[in-house]
Image: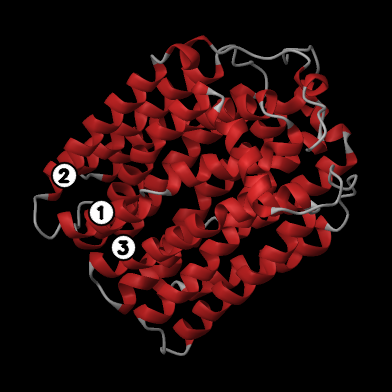
Amino acid sequence: MTPHGAPARSAFGDRNFRWFFLARAITLVTGSMSSIALAFAVLQIDNHPVSLSLVLTAFTVANIVFVLFGGVVADRLPRALVIQACYVLDIVSIGTIAYLLFTATATIPVVVGLAAVNGASTAFVLPAMQGIIPQLTTPAHLQQANAMLSFVRSAVTIGGPVIAGILVTTVGPAWAMVVQVAGWVAAIPILAMVKLPPPAGDGRFSLFADLRIGWTEFWGRSWLVAVVLAFMIMNAIHVGAWGVVGPYIAKNDERLGIAGWGWVVSAEGAGVLLMTLLLMWFPLKRPLRMGMIGISLFALPLTMLGMHPVVVLVAIAAFLAGAGAEVFSTGWNVAMMENVPTDKLSRVSSYDMLGSFVVMPIGTLVYGWLITRADPAVVLVTSGILYALIAIGTAAVPSVWRMGRAEGSTAARAESTP
């Protein structure tokens, strides 16, 4: 049972959540192959880790540049409409990459530019999605709603990467991108069925005033600042070591291979899937403490990838890391949604994303350079140790360690936007 004694399926009692869940599920299913498809599309054009790091950096830099503006827009405009508009941009950017791959005219500079468009779109989507969930369901079902969405995400990532690995090695990565585009096309009219009240406020739009309000809300919470500062480094390690070094080793080390990398990523998704099932029924009484301990498990697959990149061993480590990552993901979302006013949640989330993402471009570039200059095994093992130390150290911060669940939080957060 949930903390309030309701069955796990109760979040589906709200019509708006059902429509949003359907749209999100479709995009998750169709996009489950996208990360592997993009990575190996780049390596197909130019088999060099620096090329892959440039594409990932372009995506992340665009995300960083626009994420604060995205938070303001998502708090001021209907969030479902913001998401729909961004899906149109995604259709154009990813669809163009697929076309260029089909016609054998793709180049790294063009893919870098299109990845930047996709990154800018994501800068608006993520704050909008973070802010919309408390509007779709009751406070009693926030953990359930987040766990249900994570369940779909993890379920599709179990099969998606495996299928992507097979597609890439047989017909090429462009077909996976076509499937993703089809998902966005289907999701747009479904999101039109989500009917929410207009955003709160007096109708005035002031970018700097809204950003200042968001900053005040962000900086006034020590637990939020501590976790974001930790992820500033942890995400840089993740995107560099896992996102750049991982595919490079998979392509060039026969002990792992492209198909094997697909199984590893799927195993990570399986770990997330198992944990989402548990979190639908068992509440996290200390969401941030357990979340930071859980996320520290990502050090396991990083270390194993460096020491002995055999499919079975890396997959087992990735499974454990996936379970731990879901504890953090659900705990973090619940903590944010229960402790930040709903009408400011997208702006606060945008500061969270800015801080968490800002060093990621450096991570992709540094790791792309590192593995051309140093032993990849040493790089990965060192990264795993550092990752674990940061995660456990953050869990020990008093405001993170002590945080519990906020009862009746939505009523307390019913504030009007200045």
Q: Are marks 2 and 3 in contact (CB under 8 Å)?
A: no
Residue beneath disc 2? 379
Question: Label 2 to label 3, Cα distance in Å?
Answer: 16 Å
Residue underneath mark 3? 53
Q: Earlier in the sequence, mark 3 or mark 1?
A: 3
- Few, some or many C-alpha atoms within 10 Å of disc 2 (few <14, some 14-19, many ≥20)? some
Is 104 placed above or below 185 here? below
- Residue 336 falls in which quadrant of the image? top right
The reply to whether dot 2 and dot 1 touch (C-beta < 8 Å) is: yes
Give the residue type at disc 3. Ser
Q: Dot 3: what SS? A: helix
Nearest the viewer among 118 and 243 is 118
Residue at image x 47%, y 85%?
100
Return the residue nearer the eye: 346 or 322.
346
Percent from the top left, x then y, of residue 395?
41, 18
The vertical placement of 350 against 294, above or below, is below
Q: CA distance from mark 2 to mark 1?
A: 9 Å
Q: How is the image coloured?
A: secondary structure
The answer, for residue 373, to whether it is visible in the render is yes
Residue 350 numbered mark, or none: none
Q: Please tell me which of labels 2 and 3 falls first in the chain.
A: 3
Residue 245: give its label.
1
Residue 173 location (% of width, % of height): 45, 71
